[in-house]
Image (cartoon, grey):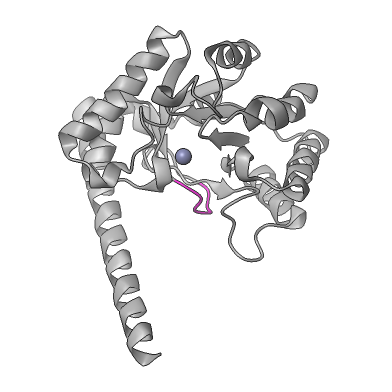
Amino acid sequence: MITFIDDDGKQEVWTKLRPLFVSKNIPCVLAISTGLIGQEGYLNMEQLQDLYQSGWEIASHTKNHVNLSQLSRKDQEYELHESKKDLVSWGLGGNSLVYPYGEYNLDTIKLARKYYDSAFRATRRGESRLPLHQYILNRDALGTWTRKGQDTLGFYKKRVDISKKKGRWVIFAIHIADTSEIQLDYISQLLEYCIEQKVDVVTIEEALRRKRNQWYEKLDCKKKTYMLNVFCFMHISALKIFRGIKKIGIFIMRRRS
Ligand SMILES: [Zn+2]
C-alpha cells in the first residue's frame, strides 16, 4: 500500500502533478496551509474543489505554514484548530495533518490527536507502525529533499517492492514546485510501476481504514491514551537526545577544523 502526499499546495500541483495522477486515475493527497490558498503561486479554491471531487484527499499543513515546535502551546492550537475549521467549512475533510518543516514537540502531538486522525513528519525514510506511530508517521522523500543515493528511480522502486513484499505502508513526500524535470519523470514512471506491480495507491483515510489494528481497537480509551502518551514521550525524548548529540558532534568538528 502506497500513499503520495504533496506539501504546500503550490500552483505546480495543478500544472505538473495533476496531469500525472489524473491520467493514471491514481489519487494523491495535498497538504495545504489554508491561510495561503488563493494567494499568488498557490492553488485557488476552485482548483482545490476540483481535485477533491476527483478523489484526492486534502490534509492540513497548518494555517500559516509555521514551525510548530517554536510556538507556544496556545499558538500551536490556533494553527491546528483554524486550519481544521477552514477545511471542514470548505467541505474538504481535513482529517490528517502534515507538520511544516517536519518539526514538532510533545504539545504538537497532543494537539494533533485532539484535532486529527493522523499526522506526518517530513522525509524520514521508513515504514510506520500503526497505531503507535499514528501522529509521527514517516515519509520517504520523493523528488526533493532526498538523501544522497536515495534519489534514483531504482531506489524509489525498491520502496514499492518492500511495500508489496512485506505488506507495509510506504508514504512518499513530494514538493512538486521544487521538483526537477528528471525527478518529475521518475514520479511518472513510479506511478506506472505501482500499476504494473498491482500495488494499491490509496489516500490516508483509506490506508487508516485498511491498516486498523484490531488488537488496539479493543483497548478502552484510557489504555489507548496511556500507551500513546508513553510512546510519544519516549519518541520526543529520543529525538532530543539525538539532536543534542548531533549538536555536540558539529561543535567538535568545528573546533577541529
Ligand atoms: Zn511545507
**211 above or below 140?**
above
Judging depth in this view, the residue of 197 and 20 nearest the camera is: 20
Q: Position of residue 10 (x, y in %)?
A: 57, 31
Horizontal side of 82 relative to 188 (left or right) equals left
Read off the magenta span: 122-127
Quick check: 100 left or right of 221?
right
**Is residue 161 left or right of 38 when viewed as pictured?**
right
Picture coordinates of residue 232, whole percent (x, y): 27, 46
Quarter that holds the C terminus: bottom left
- Based on the picture, tell me whether residue 123 belongs to the magenta stretch: yes
Q: Nearer the viewer, residue 162 or 30?
A: 30
Question: What residue is drawn where x is 41% and y is 46%?
Answer: 101
Q: Determine if the magenta segment contains residue 48.
A: no
Residue 167 appearing in the image: no
Is any atom of residue 96 visible in this view? Answer: yes
Residue drawn at 39 percent across, 8 percent down: 89
